[in-house]
Image (cartoon, coloured by chain):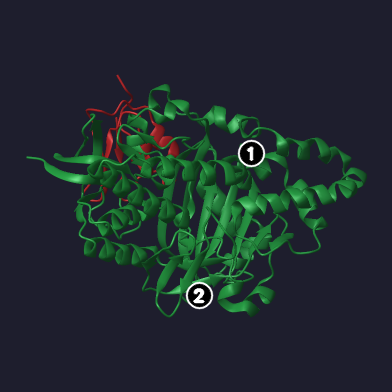
């Protein structure tokens, strides 16, 4: 026997939960399907931060209402409850292999502005999920866990979503099943996308890390023989804890070796980890494709990472989910009223304007591709040594790359004089990402039958 | 075929999405490989950051 819903939402991450909340609040009959049995448990690696608290990001400005315990999206006019601890993040510092610092903001300055000096906000994602689940349930959404969806079939009248020996019928579906979405793949979207690389990560919550600051994002690079490895250290909303993540774009890079490099070999960073206590471990593995240009096909609307390049960050996923849930509610009402449809086309226009045009994915990937351009540790050490002044306080990966581009431009006369051999490398920054990452792309491309 | 070493796996689910034949599933919050569907393409072995998938025998 099947159940009939207005909309079936696949995936109870930030995008799916907000989509369910929006459609549920509009009075639609919503089913939310999740393959885990415990929605709030988090095994996948995540920075667990709201990035970009000090500027517009994906067309919205996020405010944390500390008294009211709400995360508020000021431009899109919605909020969600978060009744857990937070930690402001006051700057982003990138360290070259020898410890030269490229600073997006100085925490000793930004801290003076309190919440309004923060570039990001760290939170506990398991608590956020619990709060969102409460809101979704209160909005009347039927939540089904342990459903690993493996088929979505569509007709002119509706959709049928099946998995784990259950079947759900609806008028529309929202695919919020994340990067490398099985549904997007089934609907044929991947055939039009450009493949770049993997993004693989492994990391731990850690205690007793003696980092330069506990309330900033810190990142660094290592040059492994085949491809670069990265370390990102995120603040945690718990005393003396940090979230330490090791990443690579290339599957030939051994993440254990990357972790060993930063924690034991590199004298600059190894000192931070001498007493480190490793707590919970997390991991993730995903392909990086170019984003999906038109995220609607056959009564299935895509939300969040499902249609994006790599990840939209949590705030981007929440915005997209809210707008997708609202768009489907609008479409349902349009159908019933008999008015001309525009809910879904408005969503697609918004998607194209924000995700595709304002936040070009190659600028995001450039955050990881810089060591592919400056492909020797000494190059990175040298460029960072030239930077005397901090860049603007920023944790918007798109804006950061603009700042970085302007910085490199300003350094060109010095580099031309001191290290002219670096100029051809820097010129590669303006090449297409497929050329910058060509070797990794070739080594990691998915099998032909993945599309 | 490939089997997941449950001691190493934290159920992040990355391999589930990347498996070209949809042979990997989440069952009761654990990652499980369906031996009927596994073609031993070893994508999961290549991508797992924790080295949890183990090749038991090569494809025949």
Residue A351 point in image, percent of width and height? 47, 44
Q: Residue at x 38, y 42 (%)?
A: A342
Is A323 in front, or is A278?
A323
Instruction: Indicate the quadrant where residue A447 lies.
Output: top left
Position of residue A136 relative to residue A436, above or below, is below
User: Mark 1 — on which chain does it sit?
Assistant: A
Query: Sequence order check: which comes first, mark 2 or mark 1?
Result: 1
Q: Residue at x 79, y 64 (%)?
A: A389
Q: How far is the residue under mark 2 from the one under mark 1?
A: 34 Å
Q: Residue at x 66, y 65 (%)?
A: A393
* Image quarter of the C terminus of chain A: top left
Please indicate whether residue A110 sits to the left or right of residue A254 in the image. right
Residue B45 point in image, percent of width and height? 40, 36
Q: In this rendering, which labeled residue sits more in front, label 2 or label 1?
A: 2
Residue A251 visible in the picture: no
The hue of chain B in the figure is red
Is A432 in front, or is A211?
A432
Q: Which chain is green?
A: A
Question: Could you say whether the residue bearing mark 1 is in a helix, strand or loop?
Answer: loop
Q: Residue at x 34, y 44 (%)?
A: A177
């Amino acid at each position: 026997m099947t159940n009939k819903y207005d909309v079936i939402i696949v995936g109870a991450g930030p995008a799916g939960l907000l989509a369910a909340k929006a459609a549920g609040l509009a009075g639609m009959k919503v089913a939310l399907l999740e393959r885990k049995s415990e929605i709030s448990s988090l095994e996948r690696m995540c920075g667990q931060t709201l990035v970009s608290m000090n500027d517009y990001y994906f067309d919205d400005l996020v405010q944390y209402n500390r008294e009211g315990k709400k995360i508020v999206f000021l431009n899109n006019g919605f909020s969600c409850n978060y009744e857990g601890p937070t930690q402001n993040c006051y700057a982003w510092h990138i360290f070259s292999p020898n410890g030269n610092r490229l600073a997006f903001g100085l925490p000793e300055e930004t801290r003076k502005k309190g919440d309004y000096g923060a570039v990001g906000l760290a939170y506990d994602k398991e608590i956020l999920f619990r709060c969102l689940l409460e809101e979704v349930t209160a909005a009347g959404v039927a939540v089904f866990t342990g459903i690993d969806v493996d088929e979505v079939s569509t007709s002119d009248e509706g959709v049928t979503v099946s998995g784990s020996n259950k079947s759900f019928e609806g008028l529309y579906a929202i695919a919020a099943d994340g990067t490398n979405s099985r549904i997007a793949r089934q609907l044929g979207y991947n055939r039009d996308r450009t493949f770049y690389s993997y993004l693989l990560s492994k990391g731990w919550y850690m205690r007793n890390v003696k980092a330069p600051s506990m309330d900033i994002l810190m990142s660094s690079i290592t040059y492994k023989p085949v491809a670069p490895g990265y370390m990102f250290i995120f603040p945690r909303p718990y005393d003396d804890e940090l979230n330490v993540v090791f990443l690579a774009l290339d599957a030939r890079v051994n993440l254990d070796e990357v972790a060993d490099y930063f924690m034991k070999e590199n004298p600059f960073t190894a000192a931070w980890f001498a007493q480190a206590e490793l707590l919970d471990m997390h991991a993730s593995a995903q392909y990086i494709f170019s984003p999906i240009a038109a995220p609607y096909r056959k009564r299935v609307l895509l939300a969040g990472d499902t249609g994006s390049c790599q990840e939209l960050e949590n705030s981007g996923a929440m915005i997209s989910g809210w707008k997708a849930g609202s768009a489907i509610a609008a479409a349902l009402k349009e159908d019933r009223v008999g008015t001309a449809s525009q809910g879904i086309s408005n969503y697609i226009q918004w998607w194209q304007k924000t995700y595709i045009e304002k936040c070009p994915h190659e600028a995001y990937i450039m955050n990881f591709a810089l060591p592919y351009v400056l492909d020797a540790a000494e190059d990175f050490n040298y460029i960072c040594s030239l930077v005397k002044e901090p860049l603007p306080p920023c944790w918007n990966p798109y804006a950061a790359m603009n700042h970085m581009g302007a910085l490199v431009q300003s350094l060109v006369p010095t580099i031309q004089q001191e290290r002219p051999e670096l100029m051809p490398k820097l010129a590669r920054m303006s090449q297409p990402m497929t050329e910058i990452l060509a070797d990794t792309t070739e080594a990691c491309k998915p099998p032909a039958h993945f599309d | 075929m490939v089997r997941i070493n449950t001691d190493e796996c934290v159920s992040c689910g990355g391999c589930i999405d990347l498996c070209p034949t949809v042979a990997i599933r989440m069952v009761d919050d654990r990652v499980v490989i369906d031996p009927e569907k596994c073609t031993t393409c070893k994508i999961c072995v290549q991508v797992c950051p924790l080295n949890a998938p183990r090749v038991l025998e090569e494809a025949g």
